[in-house]
Amino acid sequence: LTPSRARLPYPPPPFPTCCRPSSAAAAHAAHPLPRRGSPRLLAVRAMASGNPYAAELAAAKKAVTLAARLCQAVQQDIVHSGIQSKADKSPVTVADYGSQILVSLVLKMEVSTGPFSLVAEEDSEELRKDGAEEILEEITDLVNETISDTGSYNISFTKEGILSAIDDGKSKGGPSGRHWVLDTIDGTKGFLRGDQYAVALALLDEGKVVLGVLACPNLPLSSISNQNGSSSGDQVGALFSATIGCGAEVESLDGSPPQNVCSIDNPVNASFFESYESAHSMHDLTGSIAEVHKTPPVRIDSQAKYGALARGDGAIYLRFPHKGYKEKIWDHAAGSIVVTESGGIVTDAAGNDLDFSKGRFLDLDTGVIATNKQLMPSLLKAVQDAIKEKNQAASLL
Ligand SMILES: Nc1ncnc2c1ncn2[C@@H]1O[C@H](COP(=O)(O)O)[C@@H](OP(=O)(O)O)[C@H]1O
Ligand SMILES: [Mg+2]
C-alpha cells in the first residue's frame, strides 16, 4: 500500500465509454451510452435541459470556476515561494476568504429565488480584530483583481463589503428551505503542498442535496486510475456537476463542452481512493479491507476523490476518521451527489445514506463508503468485519 500523489506522468487507461444519468441507469444497463459528441449524448443533454435547478446549476458552476481561479493564483504563489514549508498559513486563509466571497457574490447575482442562505466555514470575526487590517486588504485586493481580470461583474468591494459578504456564510443549514453548502478550499493540506484540492458547492433543498459542483483545478482531465493517482494527460482542471435526477457531467475548468460522467462499473480489482492524510482517515483499516478486495489505494486530497470515482477512475472511496471526529456537511455534499448521479452509492459504515439535514455536521456511523451498486454489499461486509476486528484488537490492549 504505497502513498500516492496525483501529478506524476503515467500511461492513461482507455477513457470511460459509458455515460448516463442515474435515473436512466437501469434502462441503459445493457446499452451503455456512447462517447462524447455522439447523437445519443445530445439526447441526454436535452433531458438535462428539463432540469428544475438549471439556473442554480449554471450559477454554481460560474461561482466555483471563479473561486478556483482565485485559489489557483494563490496556490501557484505558495508553490513558487515555498511558503508552505514554513507552515505559514496566511496565503491559504486569504484564498479561503476570497473563494467564499466570490461564491456568495455570484450566487446572489445570478439566483434570485427566495432568501439567500449559505453554510460555509468562514465568518468575519477574525478579520474584524486589531492586527487583521493587512490580511483584510490583501483579500479585498485579490477579490477585486479576480473580478476585474475575468470581467465577471462591474463591481468593486470595499473592506466593509468584504466583511459583510463573508458573513453571508453563517447559515446553520437544516431540514427546511434551501441552503447552499460551500467548502471554499477542500483539501487545504493538498492545496499547501501544491497537490489536489477542490472548491465544492452544493444546494440543499428540504434537507436533501439536489445539486453539486466540484471544481478540481489540479485534477487531470483523463483518468487517474492507476496506483499513484496520476495521468499522462496534459490537460488538468476538471469541473464536475450533478443535479438530482438529471445525471452528472464533467468538463474542463477552462470551458470545454460538458460530457456525461461514466457510471461506476469498474471491476473489483480497480483502484480505490482514500485521503492522502492518515490523520483524516485510518489507513490501517482501509489496508485490511483492501487485502480482501485486492485493491491498492490511490491517496489524494479533497473531494476530487468523489469526482474521480464518479468518472470511473476507481471503484471505491473509503474514509474512516479517527474516533471523535465529526464530519462536516461541506466535505461531502457536492461530492456525494456527483457520485450518486453517476450511478454510485454513498453511505456510512452501517450502510445508511448520509443525512445532510441535521445542520453543519453529519451524524455518521464510523465512516463514509462510496462505490457502485454491485460492489456495495460485499464492501459493506468487509468494512464491518474490519471495524469489528479492529475494535476487538483494541479491547484486548
Ligand atoms: N481529523 C480529521 N479527520 C477527518 N477529517 C478531517 C480531519 N481534520 C480535517 N478533516 C477534514 O478533511 C478534509 C480534507 O479531506 P481529505 O482528507 O479527503 O483531503 C478537510 O477539509 P478542508 O481541507 O476543507 O479543511 C477537513 O474538513
Ligand atoms: Mg473540506
Image: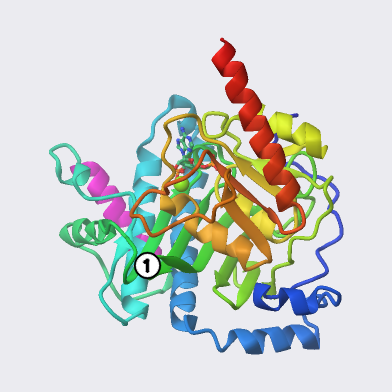
Q: Quadrant of the N terminus?
A: top right
Quadrant of residue 102 within the rendered picture: bottom left
Q: Decide if residue 283 is in sight here.
A: no
Magenta span: predominant SS is: helix
Q: Quadrant of the C terminus?
A: top right
- Name the side, left or right, on which 380 lies relative to 211: right
Q: Tag 1's secondary structure?
A: helix
The location of residue 220, given as percent across then percent down, is 69, 55
- Name the side, left or right, on which 79 lies relative to 138: right
Report the residue at 56% width, 51% height from top.
303
Quadrant of residue 289 within the rendered picture: top right
Name the residue beneath numbered marker 1: 147
Name the kind of residue labelled 1 in the image: Ile
The location of residue 230, given as percent across then percent down, is 74, 45
- Residue 313 position (above or below residue 21): above
The location of residue 376, given as percent across then percent down, is 71, 52
- Residue in the foreground of this view, choosing between 358 and 350: 350
Q: Which residues are magenta?
A: 133-147
Q: Decide if residue 231 is in sight here.
A: yes
Number of numbered callouts drawn: 1
